[in-house]
Image (cartoon, helix red, strand yellow):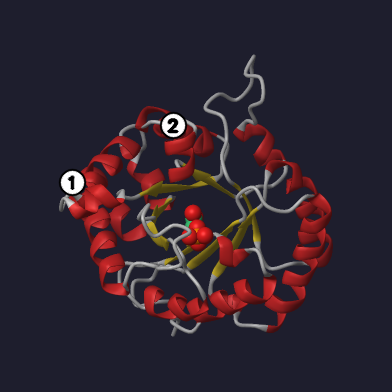
Amino acid sequence: MTASGRRPLVSGNWKMHKDHLETIHTCSELGLRLGRGAVGAVDVSIHPPFTDLRSAQSVIEAEGVPVSLGAQNCATADSGAFTGEVSAVMLARLRVEYVIVGHSERRTMFGEDDEVVAAKLQAVFRNGMVPICCVGEHADERDAGRTTERLQAQITQALGRLAPGEVARMVIAYEPVWAIGSGQPATPEDAQEAAATIRGRVTELAGAAAASGVRILYGGSVGPDSASPLVSMPDVDGLLVGGASLDPGTFTEIVGGAAATVR
Ligand code: PGA
């Protein structure tokens, strides 16, 4: 356990990579590698594409791979005439535990606004799973000194329909858009400042108990070297890892870095 009492979470966002056969292989390899390491100290989730989830579930359960299954997105509705959508009901049936909501790629490329994000958060909770809600500022907002304002607005919109007990169980990922895929993560100090801003806003909106429970991840070009310094920060409770989560060896090193911060 960390000094905060929050159990770190390291989540791998595979984005649109790996077909179901590659996923079977990757999950098996993760099981071998993570099984030997300090994974017991942290929670780990992997978020393959929808078409891979069933295969990943089978390998995780059959081989006892010490990871939770996660998804990258879900629909706002539980069922209906929504061509091409996948509902939270369907994900829960596959024993998905975590669902990423409002990733910046969904917000910028697929037009998801704060209203849609709020509805998806509700859908995830309604179906007994935990959302990982992504927030973060764009480079121009950062340059204009508007990071705090942007984060506070996103958190206010996201939490608007949630009960304090739900907020306490959720995960928020601080992902500065300028850092994603850039190879250059935020400094641990910048990540801490943003995470503290987020936790402060959660306190104002949902109370101190919710704020001390909510786990805040950092995401954006995390690699093996940056993992431990980032998770050492008092308000950074884990990592959302994109590119570096695709290789089981690299991802295992990142998990190890996060586990090294746990006393
Ligand atoms: P990255 O992606 O680690 O490849 O920068 C992180 C994310 O988008 O979640």
Indicate the amino acid at tag 1.
Answer: Glu
Identify the residue at image location x=48%, y=84%: 260
Left or right of 136 on screen, residue 46:
right
Q: Earlier in the sequence, mark 1 or mark 2?
A: 2
Nearer to me, 17 or 101: 17
Q: Dot 2: within a 10 Å radius of its alpha carbon, few (fewer than 14), some, or many (20 or more) residues?
A: some
Residue 208 sits in which quadrant?
bottom left
Q: Is residue 244 above or below residue 74?
A: below
- Say whether residue 207 is visible: no
Cα gap from disc 1 to disc 2, whole angstroms? 19 Å
Dot label at residue 149: 1
Instruction: Pinpoint residue 96: horizontal percent, then vertical percent.
Output: 65, 47
Residue at numbered disc 2: 112
Instruction: Pinpoint residue 150: horizontal percent, then vertical percent.
Output: 23, 45
Identify the residue at image location x=44%, y=41%: 102
Identify the residue at image location x=48%, y=36%: 109
Instruction: Pinpoint residue 139: horizontal percent, then vertical percent.
Output: 29, 52
- Indicate the quadrant containing the N terminus: top left, top right, bottom left or bottom right: bottom left
Pointer 2 residue Cβ closer than 8 Å to ligand 1: no
Instruction: Pinpoint residue 261: horizontal percent, then vertical percent.
Output: 43, 82
Dot label at residue 57: none
Left or right of 15 on screen, residue 194:
left
Label 2 secondary element: loop
Left or right of 100 on screen, residue 208:
left
Indicate the amino acid at tag 2.
Answer: Glu
Q: Dot 1: within a 10 Å radius of its alpha carbon, few (fewer than 14), some, or many (20 or more) residues?
A: few
